[in-house]
């Protein structure tokens, strides 16, 4: 029995494989009697409380049937099984897979049990397959869990217990629970997982790993020496309780192939180890692969200023001590990288071969842990495929070498990826709903133009440390240039236009240069030009924009036909909702008194030029009889609006 923090079984290329695990519940001083087993053959009994897990024999997979597990009537005791309860299947919308389980109390104390999903990990399709840039969805959101009355596929009238995502959101959520007297069993638990019919291309190539955890604890049925059957009513099955231990066995362990090579794959299915039988310890029946990303790069590995590196702690349990047989490793690290070098400890592997077309590096080693991959940060790109692919490579600096148009897929920086983007003074035109979607970390986004975005130009759900580009919407119905639901460190320059510079056909959108949500934060605006058809920016977070030291915040945009979103009651606005917390610079359209309280002592507002776009005009409402759109006309008696600059006094 092997203790570990968590063992993961990944669902790669839309193939789901459920690893059934059971938490072993260990009583210590002052703890309740507890017991548990895993379906990998581990059974621990504390006192006389004992629990087993059964599976109806006719729902066993072919792999389970080959194990020759003990039969219990129409059921098979899978407590000693090393095979996943749910295994195989090519998953697609509407696909489902299930098993009929039963919890059996084989001890002489009553118990209460809970079944739940734990240790759920997900990876998007674009991470598993960088070429599939549209696959940005969290597959846990579209995998429904059912407990049905019979062993069958779910129907439209069935109600799921929840999605896998709901078990992430609520750590105490269970899909089945009950109390069993000594010597009794639960009814049939027909557990089915189904991919929702509505799941689309967002979930292709995605993966999910999770454990099914059975917890058991003594129940308040037996009486103590004082005729009290409530003495153990407070017994808890919480695995985080200090009196409980958890043992989880996953499927990174495979049986040794005694007739040839044993193939090991990591949890994501992107790394392959080919272990010859001669490298295996003579007493080993299984090999166990474990891969972890180290907190820091291994000492002694040379990494240049223009390079990045990652160190992985890799171990294989079951190898022969002092092994001299080469083990072949294939490792996906990303396509199109330059100057790739592999180190074992601090020794360079001269036989390592990297294929930039596939992104796979291949090498051999006789021992393991740690391995470091070093490659150049900068990657010059000229094509759509190269640009989209480069954004998924962690630690990369992506530099665009020419103007480029992208139409086939969204431009996405995935979650967990850190990149820097240099547009090289070029223009990136994106014929999609947005020009860029950031879910990871962009250390800098600079030096060029983004054109496109039917909704917003840039969607930021992650972190952008430095932003200095020109973003211009091309759609008449655009909502704005930047939608910030994450964190932006500094906007130091650039132009952020929430309009198309064309007759504004859809005035209901009220676009802006920057839309800061209730969760969005911008630490500093030190430069940049902001304009929309309604206001320069909207901030729905009271502490959303912390400081403004520069920049130009312009009037509502009017097209060549003098049309804009604003009417006579809103034409004087420069921003909506919350002002920045501190303003010590910048030029502002008709700012009035809205930022006076935000200007610290020693700074003043200086009145400047007239705003020609909005001054000296009168508003004409929509004419229902003629169908003429609302617009503005020249009027010598119309209001004059000015620009104001915040400057340091004296």
Image: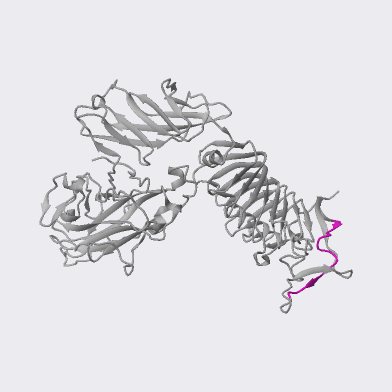
Residue 315 x %, y %: 34, 32
Residue 275 seen in render: yes
- Residue 614 is covered by the magenta coloring: yes
Q: Is residue 444 left or right of residue 594?
A: left
**Is 57 displayed left or right of 380 in the figure?**
left
From this view, report whether residue 507 is shown above or below residue 462: below
Q: Residue at x 34, y 48 (%)?
A: 15
Front residue of this view, candidates 287 and 346: 287
Q: Tell me if I can see residue 543 in this picture.
A: no
Q: Position of residue 468 (x, y in %)?
A: 68, 44
User: Please, is residue 68 above or below residue 141 in the view?
Assistant: above
Q: Nearer the viewer, residue 551 or 17?
A: 17
Q: Residue at x 16, y 54 (%)?
A: 57
Work out whether residue 223 or residue 214 is closer to the camera in this orientation and state it.
214
Quadrant (top left, top right, bottom left, bottom right) of the N terminus: top left
Q: Is residue 360 above or below residue 174?
A: above
Q: How is the image coloured?
A: one colour
Residues 481 and 129: in front is: 129
Q: Which residues are magenta?
A: 607-622
Instruction: Give the x, y percent position of residue 535.
Output: 71, 61
Q: Position of residue 185 (x, y in %)?
A: 16, 61
Q: Quadrant of residue 608?
A: bottom right
């Amino acid at each position: 029995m092997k203790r570990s923090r968590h063992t993961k079984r990944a669902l790669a290329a839309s193939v789901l494989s459920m690893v059934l695990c059971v938490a072993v519940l260990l009583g210590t001083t002052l703890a309740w009697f507890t017991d548990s087993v895993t379906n990998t053959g581990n059974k621990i009994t504390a006192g006389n409380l004992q629990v087993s897990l059964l599976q109806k024999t006719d729902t066993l997979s072919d792999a389970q049937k080959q194990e020759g597990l003990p039969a219990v009537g129409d059921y098979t005791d899978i407590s000693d099984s090393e095979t996943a309860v749910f295994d195989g299947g090519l998953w697609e919308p509407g696909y489902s897979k299930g098993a009929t389980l039963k919890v059996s109390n084989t001890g002489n104390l009553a118990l209460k049990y809970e079944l739940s999903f734990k240790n759920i990990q997900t990876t998007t399709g674009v991470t598993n397959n960088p070429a599939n840039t549209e696959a940005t969805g969290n597959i846990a959101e579209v995998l429904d869990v059912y407990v049905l009355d019979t062993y069958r596929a779910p129907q439209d009238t069935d109600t799921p217990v929840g999605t896998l995502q709901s078990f992430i959101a609520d750590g105490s959520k269970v899909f089945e629970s009950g109390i069993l007297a000594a010597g009794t069993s639960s009814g049939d638990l027909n557990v089915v997982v189904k991919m929702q019919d509505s799941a689309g291309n967002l979930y292709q190539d995605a993966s999910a790993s999770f454990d099914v955890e059975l917890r058991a604890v003594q129940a308040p049925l037996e009486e103590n020496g004082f005729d009290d059957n409530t003495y153990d009513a407070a017994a808890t099955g919480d695995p985080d309780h200090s009196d409980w231990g958890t043992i989880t066995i996953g499927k990174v362990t495979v049986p040794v192939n005694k007739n040839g090579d044993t193939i090991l794959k990591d949890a994501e299915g992107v790394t392959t180890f080919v272990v010859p039988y001669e490298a295996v310890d003579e007493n080993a029946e299984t090999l166990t692969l474990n891969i972890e990303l180290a907190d820091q790069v291994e000492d002694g590995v040379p990494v240049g200023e223009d390079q990045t590196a990652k160190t992985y702690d890799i171990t294989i349990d079951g190898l022969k001590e002092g092994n001299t047989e080469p083990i072949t490793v294939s490792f996906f690290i990303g396509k199109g990288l330059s100057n790739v070098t592999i180190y074992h400890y601090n020794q360079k592997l001269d036989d390592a071969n990297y294929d930039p077309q596939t992104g796979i590096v291949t090498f051999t080693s006789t021992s393991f842990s740690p391995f470091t991959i070093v490659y150049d940060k900068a990657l010059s790109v000229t094509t759509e495929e190269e640009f989209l692919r480069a954004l998924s490579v962690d630690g990369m600096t992506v530099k665009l070498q020419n103007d480029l148009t992208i139409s086939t897929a969204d431009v996405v920086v995935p979650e967990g990826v850190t990149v820097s983007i240099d547009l090289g003074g070029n223009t990136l035109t994106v014929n999609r709903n947005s020009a860029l979607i950031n879910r990871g970390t962009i250390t800098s986004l600079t030096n060029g133009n983004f054109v496109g975005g039917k909704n917003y130009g840039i969607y930021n759900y992650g972190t952008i440390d430095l932003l200095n580009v020109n973003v211009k919407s091309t759609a008449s119905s655009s909502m704005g240039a930047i939608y910030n639901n994450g964190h932006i460190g500094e906007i130091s320059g650039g132009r952020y236009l929430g309009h198309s510079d064309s007759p504004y056909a859809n005035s209901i959108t009220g676009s802006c240069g920057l839309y800061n949500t209730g969760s969005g934060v911008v630490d500093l605006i030190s430069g940049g030009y902001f304009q929309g058809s309604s206001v320069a920016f909207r901030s729905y977070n009271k502490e959303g924009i912390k400081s403004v030291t520069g920049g130009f915040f312009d009037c509502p945009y009017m097209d060549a036909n003098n049309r804009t979103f604003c009417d006579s009651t809103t034409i004087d606005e420069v921003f909506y909702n919350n002002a920045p917390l501190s303003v010590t610079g910048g030029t502002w359209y008709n700012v009035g008194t809205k930022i006076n309280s935000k200007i610290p002592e020693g700074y003043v507002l200086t009145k400047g030029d007239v705003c020609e776009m909005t001054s000296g005009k009168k508003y004409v409402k929509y004419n229902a009889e003629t169908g003429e759109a609302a617009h503005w006309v020249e009027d010598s008696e119309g209001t004059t609006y000015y620009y104001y600059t915040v400057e340091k006094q004296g």
